[in-house]
Image (cartoon, rainbow, N blue to C red):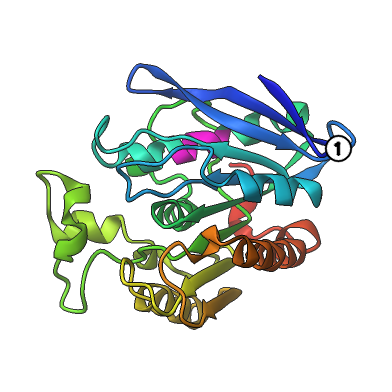
Amino acid sequence: MVEAHQHVQVDEGVVYGRGGGRELRGDVYTPPGGRPQGAPGVVIVHGGGWREGDRSQLRGYGLRLARQGYVCAAIEYRLLGEAPWPAQIEDVKAAIRWMRANAERLGVDPNRIAITGNSAGGHLSLLAAGTPGLAEFEGSGGHEGVSSAVAASIAFYPVTSFVDRDGRLHSTYSFLFGDEKTPERARAASPTSHVRAGFPPALLIHGNRDEVVPPAQSTGCYEALRAAGVPAELHVFADQPHGFDADPRFARHCADVMALFLERYVRAGEPAPTAGVR
């Protein structure tokens, strides 16, 4: 289905891969004026605690970023009720590979693909950014052999570490790992564990009244990124809970913050070391 929304073209239900024997779909947002040439791309990953949510959840960001010249793909992924971890990150990486493999058709620069997500989608976005080519998370959703690297990542109120300071699995998030609740598995799934020099530029956004995902998850990741010399920004919103950008006032402001970050590090900046096609 093709839909026009204030001159942004929205192609709904585009197949980007396969997972668990079924098609995986996304909605593609093309900037006004038709297919661009060499535009930055953004993969958008919804939240919902890895157990619920769908690709329409972040439609507003797809439209806002497309109006500013970004080709966006808001994707679905297999939820925990359908497939156990790590199917979720496998599907996200399949979407990145799909965008890169179809860059010419989409009008995207394959070296300027970013990723953004909210909550569980924020976790998946950071993890994808930190683990390009890691076989454990690549899966076989399609376009094997194409890089899943990204030029930058944006995460709203994400879980960034599943282990505490003593190296034990956080009980709050243990459901993600099913019957294999081991600290080793939890560390591998923690974006902060993969922070290093060369990690793509990252933007973290959180509310300081978040009782679902503590703000310390973002501040801890930010500190690790800065210690590794990674370009990183942290925006903390006063008195705001989890999901605060559902309020259109905050959504508009967050979209502007995202756009400026992407302008600096994806559109205008040099591609990050991990962004090249492997």
Crowd band around label 1 with a 10 angstrom C-alpha radius: few (<14), some (14–19), many (20+): few
Q: Is residue 238 left or right of residue 170?
A: right
Q: How many marks?
A: 1
Image vertical order of residue 27 relative to residue 164, above or below = above
The residue depicted at 56 percent of the width and 67 percent of the height is 202
* Viewport quadrant of the N terminus: top right
Given the image, on which type of amino acid does mark 1 rest?
Answer: Gln
The secondary element bearing badge 1 is classed as loop
Q: Position of residue 52 (x, y in %)?
A: 34, 41
* Viewport quadrant of the C terminus: top right
Q: Position of residue 110 (x, y in %)?
A: 70, 41
The residue depicted at 74 percent of the width and 31 percent of the height is 106
| 199 inside magenta stretch | no
Image vertical order of residue 259 relative to residue 17, above or below = below
What's the magenta region? 92-97
Overall secondary structure of the magenta stretch? helix
Q: Position of residue 225 (x, y in %)?
A: 49, 75
Which residue, as the protein is rendered here, is positioned at the far left?
Answer: 179
Picture quarter containing residue 192? Answer: bottom left
Looking at the image, can residue 197 be seen? no
The residue depicted at 56 percent of the width and 59 percent of the height is 153
Q: Is residue 251 left or right of residue 83?
A: right
Q: Position of residue 83 (x, y in %)?
A: 26, 32
Identify residue for label 1. Answer: 37
The residue depicted at 19 percent of the width and 62 percent of the height is 172
